[in-house]
Amino acid sequence: MEEYELVIGLEVHVELLTESKMFCGCSTRFGASPNSQTCPVCAGFPGTLPVINKKAVELALKAAIALNCKISSYSRFARKHYFYPDLPKNYQISQYEEPLATEGGILVDSRNIRIKRLHLEEDAGKLIHPEDGNFSLVDLNRSSVPLIEIVTEPDIKSPSEAEKFLTNLKRVLEYLEVSDCNMEEGSLRCDANISVRRYGDKGFGVKEEIKNMNSFRAVRKALEYEGRRQIDCLKRGEMLRQGTRLWNDTLQITEEMRKKEEAQDYRYFPEPDLPPLVFDNRMIKEISSQVGELPLQRKERFIKGYLLSEYDADVLTSKKDIADYFERCVEKAGRPKIVANWIMGDLTALLKSTKTDIRNSPVTPEYLVQIISMIEQGNITGVVAKIVLQECFNTGMPPEKIVSERGLSQIEDEEAINSVVKEVISESPDAVNDYKSGREQALSFLIGQTMRKTKGKVSPNIVKNKLLEYLNK
Ligand SMILES: [Zn+2]
């Protein structure tokens, strides 16, 4: 592998979060019954005329600005012709020579991956191939859903860098609320171009386009496989031919789909039914002001402002909602590191196991702050706090109420603690002997027994000290 390097570029299609389609008023809601969200415009009836969705244009502009692109003051739609059953007009309205934006970029581990262009277009419909029939069905609900296509320069040098680029891109688009970026529902799709060349070569090798990858991990796997395949071919002295390959996730290989397709095959020409998009500085300024803090900036601020580790800051800013939740807690409670640990540990586990979005967490920031301050004030132990969090998550009850109703307050009465410790010691002669003959682990067992008897209501430190006091008598 050493004598060759990989040259990778990505093409990402992102469905925009609009209520209605790109050129008609039909709903874009995912999962509706087939062909229930169509009209003569998006079904491609002759004689119908498209009307541009203003919201889609604004979202595309917002994305372009956040991705540091140069906004074209004048851009135009174009027809891209091809014949396929999911494309009722036999052409897709896209942008070609005059895209909405160009020359942007995203930082990946401090390296700028350049974005060549960002343009608006409409999605195609969907074909369904039932397994028990020799026919296919057409669903046009997705036909004409607004998309942006983001094309990078071939700046990416490794499959893992491609995966990171996509992760960062997704974060930005989610922060902007430009798209839900749900890959399972096809809101974010990615194709990759890859070629190989000898280190030091300036020219490009023969590239293959890979399609059909439905996770960022699959993109990485497909690029790893395809890079190795191309290098092996060259080493055997074989010629590579430009074409398109499909990723087979079951077999974990890429398979040839078709050979080379040229832009002129699409017979692009300017869309005569739509006016050009013209933006003035005022409009671009106004959209820029809506962009707000981006994930990378927020991460830096979390590291500097809250003294969090890079890892913690990365996890907490991975989604805007998580970062917002964290900041609401810290505003009230301070203690950023402790808040971070609770969110990233127990709360995330509960959210994941119940597939709950942090926005809908029954443990609100106010409740998490209550739990943390009860520990700090010595009202409850850390062990009990975990139980309270779980209970609060299950019932939505305020933590303070859970503690008082279930009698979970910390036991501080020394007499009460002494009597439990004595009880444990007299009930566990074996462990006591083990400890006295030098087996330290026996102490953990005794601590565990005591914690169980007090239902975790005594601080483990106090228990440990009390036990040692008795054992060393
Ligand atoms: Zn429609």
Image: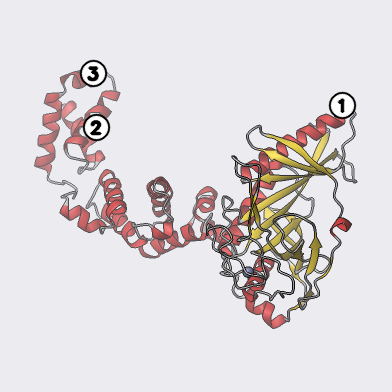
Mark 3 = which residue?
Answer: 434
Cα distance between the residues tagged 2 and 3: 15 Å
Q: Earlier in the sequence, mark 2 or mark 3?
A: 3
User: Considering the numbered disc 1 on the image, is that residue within a helix, a strand or a loop?
Assistant: loop
Disc ID at residue 448: 2
Name the spot of residue 324 as percent of width and height, x first: 46, 62
Name the spot of residue 133 as percent of width and height, x first: 62, 42
- Label 3 sits on what residue type? Asp
Q: Is residue 158 above or below residue 363?
A: above
- Label 2 sits on what residue type? Gly
Q: Is residue 397 left or right of residue 251?
A: left
The answer to which quarter of the image holds residue 432 is top left
The answer to which quarter of the image holds residue 244 is top right
Cα distance between the residues tagged 3 and 1: 67 Å
Cα distance between the residues tagged 1 and 2: 64 Å
Mark 1 = which residue?
Answer: 236
Residue placed most toward the observer, 62 or 322: 62
Circles 1 and 2 in contact, beta carbons < 8 Å: no
Which of label 1 and label 2 is nearer to you?
1
